[in-house]
Image: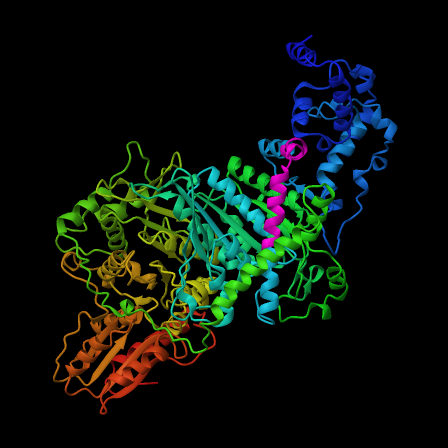
Amino acid sequence: MTKNIVANEQFWKSFYGPNIGYLEEQFDLYKRDPQAVDQSLQQMFEKYGPPSWIKESEISEPKSHESVDVKKLTSAMKLVEAIRRYAHLQADIYPVGSRKKIVDSIYPEAHGLTNEDLQSIVARDLWEEAPSYLENGLDVVEYLTDCYTGTISYEYDHVHKLAERKWLMEQIEINAKKITFAEENQKQLLDRLIEVESFENFLQRTFVGQKRFSIEGLEMMVPMLDQIVKHVTEDKIDNIMMGMAHRGRLSVLAHVLGKPIDLIFSEFHHSPDKELVPSEGSTGINYGWTGDVKYHFGATREVKFSDESSTRITLAHNPSHLEFVNPVVAGSTRAVQDDRSKRGYSDQQMDKGCSILIHGDAAFIGEGIVAETLNLSGLEGYRTGGTIHLIANNLVGYTTNQDEGRSTRYASDLAKGFEIPIIHVNADDPEACIKAIKFAYEYRKKFHKDIVIDLVGYRRYGHNEMDEPRATQPLLYQEIDNHPTVTEVYAKRLNEAGIVQENHVESMEKISADKLQKLYESLKENETVNEEVKEMPEVLSENIDRFETAVALDTLQKLNKNMLKRPEHFNRFKRLDRVFKRREKIFEAGNKIDWGVGEALAYASILRDGIPIRLTGQDSERGTFAHRHMVLHDVETSDKYCIMHGIPEAKASFDIHNSPLSEAAVLGFEYGYSIESPDTLVIWEAQFGDFANAAQVIFDQFISSARAKWGEKSNMVVLLPHGYEGQGPEHSSARLERFLQMAAENNWIIANVTSSAQFFHLIRRQAAMRGRMIARPLILMTPKSLLRNERVSSVAKDFYEGHFYPLKSQPNLEISEEKVTRLIVGSGKIMVDIEEAIANSEQSYDFLAAYRLEQIYPFPKKDLQEVIERFPSLEEIVWVQEEPKNMGAWNFIRDYFQEIKGDNHVLEYIGRPRRSATSVGEPNIHRTIQSQIVNQVVQPNKGGN
């Protein structure tokens, strides 16, 4: 006998008399269903096996391995594997509109087996980890079928890591069976459902026909989120970052985020109650000056621990572009996890934040941003330690059925490509839903990976409460109309078990309804229709050029020297030696600081000021145009070294990462990072400016307008390579006009600078604004061919004495103020081309003055007014651009010029005519057109087109 068997026998010897009969009876029940006996007995039988006095023959008929029919055992193993893989297809996960499928492969007959064949196999020969009360193969098959075909089912066959698969199987097949619910917990769960349902019913009755995107049919979402909050607070994680679309948002705001219900009523009721004090535990509900609809707002809440520590829950603001909040939440989560206080890469501490994303079933599979965000989850620069994804599956997308909205069986199938485990759970089984959350949380905690819960419910009403779904889903809604609510389903179950009285739901509903009615009546007295229109905060009108951005020469020299250091035994790429040799001599007499060095000095000096920097984008470590070389690779080991990490003066982290081939998700991630860490200078760089097109929703709905809508502040920088060099439509224009169309209320800064010193001061000014009320994003057109053009290099003095000039005089052009008849104003590369043309010409240009508009928005109106007043003989003002007339800055700046120019001044446009494509694709044609534009500018009698 082994030690364990001896110990078990000793344990059972302590029982005698009537106890023996009782234990035999309980063990018999336990064999059939472990849940049928008390939890303490479950644990006892699991630990010590069957009572020692029960004859072994009564438990099983053990057979030697030699007597096993190998063919039958092999077939039985295939059956068990089929159950684990495919039984989810037959699971009871649909409250209504069932798509359950009969799967032949999970039945013995499909494998040539009979029940008798299975009974002839010892349980642990078939399944080594089988609980002791399972006697034979048939018991195993029935047990596992129950594990995978109930109201909760699992998919993990696509997860390839052995350790994960083993853990998942153990949780599903062993540990999940042990989870039981105390009666008190069952009552609390029922009461929570009553509270949620009563809130939604009150809104439905009181605000008839108003949109609210109700949670009804998916009410279990709230207790599931409660459970995550419970787990997170017990583990003392500092932050829960949440994102969700409209479905159920008001209930989540009210019940999970603690948003005052009277404030929610006021938003329906047109009451001027936006200034209501948040209820205890709720610390933030933001509004901008234009505001937004009620189901777009987020909120923040602090949940206190007994030891005075706390967890902050943040629900991100989200527009009607549904899933685009996903990367924003991911970026915010990474921001709370990163320790940026020391030089080098930031130190990620995953226990500082946990993210939860709630998706619509149609949107999860339909919106590409979901796949982009899932792809970020395992990447070093973007991972967040695992997101819990909850699909609020209401079986229909607006009026579109599943077979019209996706090519996959499940809405969750997209996650399989990323080896993310999937749990399907019936929203009408509250206890199964709580088990699913516990499972998901434990997986995320152990493996720091994403996991998906497909919460399968339905939608009690239409897409919104003004919509009629019976016109498009008549049969489904016939079933829904006759289907009891989850509260009714669960209350009946508890009533039959003797846990609650028959009138429990009715009495709790009355208490809840009375409370809501009192809140509503207190608001009616203050009703008003004419609310005061809010204005842009005055602070945004303040001067942003007041910051000192120059850096002392000796400091710049020291920073440059330290950026040239390399780790000991680092095997450099020899062809880069020329680049860094040139950088060694950059401050010697006669040398100029090129764009690459100017950028590096800007970042190094910002780090010296103690400001963290995060820079990401496609190929940003080297730079798309090979100008940056901020991360070097050892040619023998492939080890990486960032030149910013060797600066002893740096007092903060410098994170630089090549991004995946994504614009929308990566830009959304960086935006989320910037709002959560306003003291960090967050920079996203497009490979080419045109590629930012793919992230237009992030620009439109978040970066440009979030402050006006939600009071959300960002200071991020967007670098968009821009300039016409004959490289075709996709590699010329960063669509400057689109950003200018959205420019209003000082929402952001738009610039197109033409020297390394200008870039240096502009970036340092942006860093100086961090965390302040005047902070706002910077949209910067950056050069391509100009990166190596001598004319954009600057002398050292411009760095240690200068500052940023929104309007800058054209270099190398002598101006005779009395003789000037033509004033040229333009922005970006075209002005460098004009400078070069003038330099190569022998003609006199005393009639000409030229200025570069380096900051297009906010427009430097006063500066331009002063320039115009300098020239008494001025006849014409010419705006020049290389973009077509219907693009670029012309349509934006024209009104400003009309306001400033005198009655005797003619305003002219020189540039390409209106076009449908941004540029030509033939280099020779491009050069001809570019030359024509430049010639029109510099010829005295040929203004205009």
Q: Position of residue 90 (x, y in %)?
A: 76, 45
Residue 782 in percent (x, y) is at 33, 62
Q: Eyeballing the image, is 305 above or below 52?
A: below
The one nearer the camera, 293 or 361, is 293
Query: In this picture, which residue range is highlighted in magenta?
Result: 171-195
Horizontal placement of 262 versus 210: left or right?
left
Query: Above or below — where is 259 with respect to 882?
Result: above
Residue 138 horizontal/vertical position (percent):
81, 29
Q: Is residue 260 left or right of residue 940?
A: right
Position of residue 729 measured from the top left corner of the image (x, y, whole percent): 45, 68
Name the residue at 52% across, 35% down. 446
Residue 260 visible in the current orientation? yes
- Any part of residue 360 in sight: no
- Which residue appears at 35% of the width and 55% of the height? 683
Quadrant housing the C terminus: bottom left
387, 725: nearer the viewer? 387
**Does residue 107 appear left or right of residue 335 in this picture?**
right
Residue reaching furthest top?
1
Quadrant location, the N terminus: top right
Lateral position of residue 864 relative to residue 381, left or right: left
In this picture the colour scheme is: rainbow
Query: Is residue 804 one of those drawn in magenta?
Result: no
Q: Nearer the viewer, residue 254 or 61?
A: 254
Q: Residue 134 falls in which quadrant of the image?
A: top right
